Image: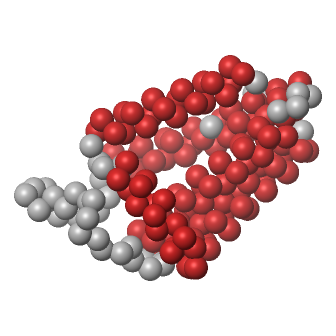
Amino acid sequence: MIALVRYLMADVVRAQKWTAPLLVAAFVLVSAATGGTVLRAWLGIHFGIGCRPDVSEQDTTKGADEEKEGRFPEKIPATMTTAVVILLAGGLLVGVVPFAEWTWSGVLLGLFSAALAVAIGVVGANFGLGRLRPLLKSPLHVVHRLHSGHVGDYVAWLLLGMTVAGALFAFT
């Protein structure tokens, strides 16, 4: 993914279009926000860092009628470990083998994006939304309603995201 972003950024920067700074900023912010969110979740799930989410009775799927599927395994299965190792090795290989010409600006933007992701993850895990929580309560309620957990919702959001991404690439 990082190599693809670098490749697309290099093409955009070389083209010297008016959209170049906007796309570069979008790539950096989106990758930083995604990385920060994953890091925040990882810190919360595996290390218990951060506050627990509010338990709400509304708009959630409790699974009260579902049977318990089993217990947490004592040891992580080899298939899960192997999949993680293969994905990490593939990501490292794609990131190390340059598909496009490396530039100092690309390397610096990548480092900035990674540092911003770490900052977002650590601040998010330790402080949460803080004073922004009351301001975001209403919009977050709408987002939670739209993400009901139904598979059709996920498919609809995936198609919307792919359509928007396709439109961005078609018009730039």
Question: Residue at coordinates 57% horizontally, 38% vertically from top-left?
Answer: 90
Q: Which image quarter is the N terminus in?
A: top right
Residue sitting farthest toward the top:
170
In the figure, is residue 22 to the left or right of 36?
right
Can residue 50 be seen in the rendering of this structure?
A: yes
Q: Quadrant of residue 131?
A: bottom right
Q: What colour scheme does the image use?
A: secondary structure
Q: Position of residue 77 (x, y in %)?
A: 30, 53
In the image, is 141 to the left or to the right of 10? left
Q: How many numbered marks have been drawn onto this rendered protein structure?
A: 0
Residue 68: give x, y in percent of width and height: 11, 60
> In the picture provided, is 123 more to the left or to the right than 12?
left
From where the camera sits, is residue 73 visible? no
* Depth check, front residue: 89 or 153: 153
Residue drawn at (35%, 53%) of the image: 145
Residue 41: % across, % down: 47, 64
Q: Compare residues 76 and 5 and report the one nearer the observer.
A: 5
Up/down of 107 relative to 98, above or below: below
| Residue depicted at 42% across the width and 43% down the height | 83
Residue 36, percent from left and from top? 60, 60
Q: Give the quarter of the figure containing the C terminus.
A: top right
Residue at x 36% of width, y 75% of height: 54
